[in-house]
Image (cartoon, grey):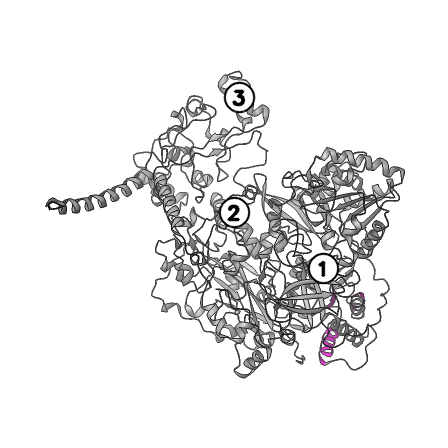
């Protein structure tokens, strides 16, 4: 009777075991990468919204201050999403008949809130506070990007913990004068590190990396 | 494995052991004291009978199914994008609302008619937590466990959710139509067939409304019945009392004004605040209460013996006829002490005591010159003070005679709580139209035609008076979740304006009281402050002393005496559906989820019963089967049971818990009397008790001395147990340049009331686990109150020690976590990071204080929608497989720190108040920055009484305790 397995069978067996292990390692690596990728975190991906609200138009072209709508950003953990009433203050006069704005008018008429899709979202065990960042000289643009160029809102940063820690470990690199916090086109000066160190000292910025700073 | 903590050790064995080998000085339970084999095996395991989930062998199919599911989920998880969540703004944002910032509104919680002022925390219109109102006389900023748990009561999914007729869905308009017909019919009879049954009413508006109705229907009647009826006509000033004698009065925990009384009492007891003298408390009581556990001398007595004591004490003080024979040495000692403190003492009689004892207490206060100084008579706080049992009895008689056409029951659950001999439900069946306004569809609703869901106090406009008469206007924190109606609204259905809201009703009453043009200012201020100024009941001059009824015949020796009491947390049973309160260990026994028959060890031995034995009780025809629990400190030949459990209806939590002691209630002896029969049944019943959990193996955890010993040796704490020098640690010290958080707990004033435990539960979204899990020692409360005993096994001294994460400097838990899920913070907090935790439980194993809690199962209710609103949005809701523990309320620390940073300043002392600290009636808990030498906590840590628990381990805990100092009478003779 002929041999059931040829000479190459051993090699094939060894190679396939190795291959299997490699494949497994690849799958684990690939899925971890994928899971933490910009894709999974929806970075740079515009989000559909019930109303085609353009930050580019409002914040960029019209130059409305961030705080006109995000009223609680300086005092509360939550920056605030404007109530329908805020939209209507202008849009009862301007574009009052626009079909695009029907959901806004409907909301005002019926008292039902507009349900926006959240763009910047953190997991439930992370507690971020807008007001303290604003007060310590972190610009809106530093985290949210050039909102004034975004027709539909998208994330420019993953908001992953390692990204947060970049700044929490070296705030000098990112801090700006308080006057420039709401500026969209602020350019860090040549001597950012020098200025940064000065501002960190002046604003008493602590490099908080304790877990309880954000998790509780 | 079933925990074997049930064998009752024989008392004489215990006594011998205590006497012969010196015994352990402090002990936690009779079983520990007896030191049986079983007990040692039991405490060896932190979680006895652990992982019984694995004891049921999984079958092949199950394993495959689970594996397939996990592979499937693993695959899915690898390719999920972040889910998109909704963000929903207001349409019109209220001006004062700032999303992310909590707001506080003043209101009050009435229990048994008497209000405690509260400030309720609201997040975007959702009440999430209550705190005491510092301006309210009954609160002074503190709260009790019941008030803390009331938030869960609001969001309880088991509440009655719709108006019903014959238990079928109906509509309020239909109800109004029926009431309109009632109005027409009763008008013709002048209301002769109309009866309104309420609980104790202190609400001026409700009394005014009822008064108006009685004017319109002159022959209608208003009856009142409250199972636990306090008549508020006397208030006490414990801050002026140096000697207090309590005749079965639980004034620190179980009566209107308790929070205030506890604060006043503690102010005379805190040695930590530079005080060198202490008050002295004598308590005579049948069953241990929190007041008894605080006493310097506790007399263990049957209720009938207390009357004898009162008579001989009064006789000795010249305030009554002394009984024959000479007064005992103890009576003599108490009398002398009282005589030495004329005008600065209090004699107080408890609710369960007969009129004779109350009359004697009054006479004694009069004789001692206390009246007007430490005891003040006030005009009754109730709108109509009556003998409520008499009132109910009359109503039953009229119903039986067919004189009642319409019965409106506003609040209360009389079918459950009425004395059994009145047969209230049968009598009620003879009424043509029965209407019940209640929070739950309960035993009474079941037998009524209409059930109108009641609005919770957090949903109501109303008003109520405190123990001293001060009125608070209740304002709602939220629209009624289930369209509930307040009693005010149900009552107006009888008038010509049936759709008035309670807001309109309450306002229109107060407009009659405050007629000026500045009504709006008055109204806004009253709402804002949470009190209506100048509404305290006026002081009345002491009238003539009531005659003291003659002494009855003393019961024969060996007759068992029945002693019924309201449950310390469930009250009369109205809070029985509250999981937080059901799972809160009872202060005297650490039992949860049940009520039992408390018995003394000697009586248990005599009757041949032991823990968890089911017995049949019979008293005046009432029969009840309930389990036995042997309780140190219980009077011999006395059986104590709490009302409140054993509900048949009224929610899923209430339904299966405990036994209904109301079956033994008789209308002429509502709190029991001698003559109860006990029979063993041979059945057993498992009880969830937390007393042995996390036993500390008899190490020097509690420290105490008498005042005289303390005077002699101020540093007794250090001499007793020298601390290990810090240099013995291999680990380097942490530098703390900013804040350094720490806590002290004063055991001298901790009464064990457990308000802190529930406050912590509410603040930190702590889950309820259920009886079955408590039996497995898996309760989740971050803060527990350990109860230690000392001395005499029959009537021991009691020490309460709140135990929570000690935030050790050299924390044993931090070193063993393989994933660094528990680490030290730069401010000395021992941080627990849920998202890192993989559930090895090494940390818990290595924790010498046993304060870590593990989510063995998914305990947090993630699915009941109504509970979403209740949770504190600043704290993570934990999932299965995660360790958790006290964080020193880090959410409050962070919030305050951020606020101070924005103002570019350091935090002031007292700016951060932890949830437990805020709730504490006696201010036993102090939290703050130890780096700030002027802070209260830093000063307390310099006190000679300050010590760290298990200091010899060199864990250097940040939470330290102040040793207990008692003030026994030097002339006391032990019997």
Image mark 3: chain:
A
Is residue B740 positioned above or below B171 on the image?
Answer: below
Q: Nearer the viewer, mark 2 or mark 3?
A: 2
Image mark 1: chain:
B
Comparing B493 with B233, the one in front is B493
- Identify the mark at residue B861; answer none if there is no mark: 2
Is residue B609 positioned above or below B768 on the image?
Answer: below
Mark pair 1, 2: CA separation: 34 Å
Q: Secondary structure at mark 1?
A: helix
Residue B163 visible within the image: yes
Is residue B694 positioned above or below B59 on the image?
Answer: below
Do callouts 1 and 2 mark residues in contact (Cβ within 8 Å)?
Answer: no
Q: x, y percentage for residue B746? A: 56, 64
Comparing B316 with B542, the one in front is B316
Residue B935 visible within the image: no
Q: x, y percentage for residue A7? A: 10, 46
Mark pair 2, 3: CA separation: 44 Å
Q: Secondary structure at mark 2?
A: loop
Q: Which residue is mark 1?
A: B663
In the displayed structure, does residue B15 sit left or right of residue A51?
right
Q: Secondary structure at mark 3?
A: helix
Q: x, y percentage for residue B725? A: 40, 70
Mark 1 or 2, nearer chain start: 1
Do callouts 2 and 3 mark residues in contact (Cβ within 8 Å)?
Answer: no
> What is the span of residues highlighted in magenta in the rendered image?
B329-357
Mark pair 1, 3: CA separation: 69 Å
Labels 1 and 2 within one chain: yes
Do callouts 1 and 3 mark residues in contact (Cβ within 8 Å)?
Answer: no
Q: Which residue is mark 3?
A: A90
Crowding near pointer 3: few (<14 within 10 Å), some, many (20+)? Answer: few
Comparing B675 with B563, the one in front is B675
Labels 2 and 3 within one chain: no
């Amino acid at each position: 009777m002929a041999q059931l397995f040829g000479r190459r069978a051993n090699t094939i067996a060894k190679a396939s075991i190795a291959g299997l292990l490699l494949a497994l390692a690849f799958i684990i690596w690939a899925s971890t990468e994928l899971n933490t990728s910009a894709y999974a975190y929806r970075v740079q991906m515009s989000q559909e919204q019930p109303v085609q609200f353009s930050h580019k138009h409002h914040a960029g072209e019209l130059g409305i201050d961030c705080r006109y709508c995000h009223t609680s950003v300086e005092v509360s953990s939550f920056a605030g999403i404007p109530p329908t009433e805020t939209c209507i203050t202008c849009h009862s006069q301007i574009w009052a008949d626009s079909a695009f704005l029907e959901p806004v008018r409907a909301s005002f008429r019926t008292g039902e809130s507009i349900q926006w899709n959240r763009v910047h979202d953190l997991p439930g065990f992370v507690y971020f506070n807008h007001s303290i960042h604003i007060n310590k000289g972190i610009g809106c643009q530093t985290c949210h990007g050039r909102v004034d160029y975004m027709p539909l809102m998208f994330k420019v940063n993953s908001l992953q913990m390692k990204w947060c820690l970049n700044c929490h470990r070296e705030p000098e690199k990112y801090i700006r004068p308080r006057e420039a916090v709401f500026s969209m086109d602020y350019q860090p000066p040549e001597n950012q590190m020098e200025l940064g160190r000065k501002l960190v000292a002046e604003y008493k910025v602590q490099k908080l990396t304790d877990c309880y700073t954000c998790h509780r | 494995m079933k925990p074997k903590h049930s064998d009752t050790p024989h008392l004489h064995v215990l006594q011998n052991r205590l006497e012969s080998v010196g015994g352990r000085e402090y002990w936690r339970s009779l079983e520990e004291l007896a030191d049986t084999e079983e007990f040692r095996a039991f405490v060896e395991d932190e979680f006895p009978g652990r992982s019984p989930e694995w004891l049921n062998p999984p079958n092949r199919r199950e394993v495959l199914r689970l594996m397939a599911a996990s592979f499937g989920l693993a695959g899915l998880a690898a390719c999920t994008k972040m889910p998109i969540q909704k963000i929903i703004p207001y349409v019109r944002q209220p001006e004062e609302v700032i999303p992310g910032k909590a707001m506080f509104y003043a209101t009050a919680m009435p229990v048994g008619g008497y209000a405690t002022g509260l400030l309720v925390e609201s997040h975007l219109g959702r009440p999430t937590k209550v705190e005491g109102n510092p301006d309210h006389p009954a609160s002074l900023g503190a709260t009790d466990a019941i008030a803390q748990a009331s938030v869960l009561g609001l969001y309880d999914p088991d509440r009655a959710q719709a108006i019903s007729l014959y238990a079928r869905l109906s509509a309020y308009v239909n109800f109004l139509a029926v009431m309109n017909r009632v109005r027409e019919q009763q008008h013709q009879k002048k209301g002769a067939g109309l009866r309104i049954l309420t609980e104790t009413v202190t609400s001026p508006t409700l009394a005014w409304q009822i008064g108006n109705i009685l004017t319109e229907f002159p022959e209608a009647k208003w009856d009142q019945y409250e199972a636990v009826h306090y008549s508020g006509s006397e208030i006490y000033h414990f801050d002026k009392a140096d000697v207090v004698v309590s005749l079965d009065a639980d004034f620190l925990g179980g009566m209107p004004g308790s929070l205030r009384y506890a604060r006043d009492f503690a102010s005379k007891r805190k040695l930590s605040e530079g005080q060198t003298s202490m008050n002295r408390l004598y308590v005579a009581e049948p069953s241990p209460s929190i007041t008894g556990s605080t006493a310097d001398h506790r007399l263990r007595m049957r209720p009938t013996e207390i009357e004898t004591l009162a008579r001989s004490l009064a006789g000795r003080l010249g305030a009554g006829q002394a009984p024959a024979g000479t007064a005992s040495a103890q009576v003599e000692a108490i009398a002398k002490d009282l005589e030495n403190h004329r005008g600065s003492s209090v004699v107080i009689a408890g609710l369960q005591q007969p009129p004779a004892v109350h009359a004697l207490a009054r006479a004694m206060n009069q004789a001692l010159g206390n009246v007007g100084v430490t005891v003040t008579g006030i005009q009754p706080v109730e709108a109509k003070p009556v003998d409520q049992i008499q009132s109910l009895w009359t109503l039953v008689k009229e119903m039986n005679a067919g004189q009642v056409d319409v019965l409106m029951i506003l609040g209360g659950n009389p079918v459950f709580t009425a004395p059994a001999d009145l047969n209230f439900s049968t009598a009620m069946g003879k009424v043509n139209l029965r209407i019940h306004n209640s929070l739950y569809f309960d035993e009474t609703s079941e037998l009524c035609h209409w059930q109108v869901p009641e609005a919770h106090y957090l949903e109501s406009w109303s008003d109520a008076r405190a123990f001293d008469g001060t009125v608070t206007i209740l304002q709602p924190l939220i629209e009624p979740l289930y369209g509930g109606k307040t009693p005010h609204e149900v009552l107006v259905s009888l008038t010509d304006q049936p759709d008035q809201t309670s807001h309109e009703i309450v306002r229109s009453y107060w407009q009659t009281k405050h007629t000026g043009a500045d009504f709006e200012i008055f109204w806004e201020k009253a709402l804002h402050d949470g009190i209506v100024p100048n509404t305290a009941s006026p002081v009345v001059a002491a009238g003539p002393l009531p005659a003291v009824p003659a002494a009855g015949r003393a019961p024969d020796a060996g007759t068992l005496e029945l002693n019924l009491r309201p449950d310390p947390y469930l009250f009369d049973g109205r809070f029985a559906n509250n999981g937080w309160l059901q799972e809160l260990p009872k202060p005297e026994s650490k039992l949860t989820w049940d009520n039992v028959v408390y018995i003394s060890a000697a009586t248990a031995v005599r009757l041949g019963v032991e823990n968890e034995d089911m017995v049949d009780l019979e008293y005046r025809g009432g029969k009840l089967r309930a389990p036995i629990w042997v309780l140190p400190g219980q009077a011999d030949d006395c059986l104590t049971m709490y009302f409140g459990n054993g509900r048949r209806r009224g929610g899923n939590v209430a339904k299966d818990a405990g036994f209904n002691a109301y079956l033994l209630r008789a209308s002429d002896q509502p709190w029991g009397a001698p003559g109860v029969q006990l029979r063993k049944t041979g059945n057993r019943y498992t009880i969830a008790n937390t007393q042995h959990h996390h036993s500390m193996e008899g190490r020097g955890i509690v420290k105490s001395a008498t005042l005289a010993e303390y005077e002699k040796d101020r540093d007794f704490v250090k001499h007793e147990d020298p601390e290990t020098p810090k240099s013995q640690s291999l680990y380097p010290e942490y530098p703390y340049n900013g804040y350094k958080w720490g806590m002290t707990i004063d055991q001298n004033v901790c009464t064990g009331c457990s308000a802190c435990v529930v406050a912590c539960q509410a603040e930190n979204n702590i889950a309820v686990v259920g009886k079955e899990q408590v039996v497995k020692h898996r309760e989740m409360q971050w803060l527990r109150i350990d109860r230690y005993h000392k001395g005499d096994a029959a009537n021991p001294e009691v020490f309460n020690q709140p135990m929570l994460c000690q935030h050790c400097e050299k924390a044993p838990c931090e070193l063993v976590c393989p994933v660094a899920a528990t680490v030290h913070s730069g401010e000395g907090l021992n941080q627990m990071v849920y998202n890192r935790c993989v559930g090895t439980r090494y940390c818990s194993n290595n924790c010498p204080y046993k304060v870590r809690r593990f989510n063995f199962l998914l305990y947090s209710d993630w699915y009941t929608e109504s509970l979403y609103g209740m949770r504190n949005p600043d704290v993570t809701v934990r999932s299965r497989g995660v360790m958790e523990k006290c964080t020193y309320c880090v959410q409050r620390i962070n919030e305050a720190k951020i606020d101070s940073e924005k103002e570019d300043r350091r935090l002031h002392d007292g700016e951060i108040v932890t949830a437990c600290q805020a709730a504490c009636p006696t201010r036993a808990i102090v939290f703050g920055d130890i780096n700030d030498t002027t802070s209260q906590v830093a000063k307390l840590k310099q006190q000679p009484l300050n010590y760290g628990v298990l200091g010899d381990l060199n864990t250097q805990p940040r939470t330290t305790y102040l040793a207990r100092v008692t003030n026994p009478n030097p002339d006391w003779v032990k019997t």
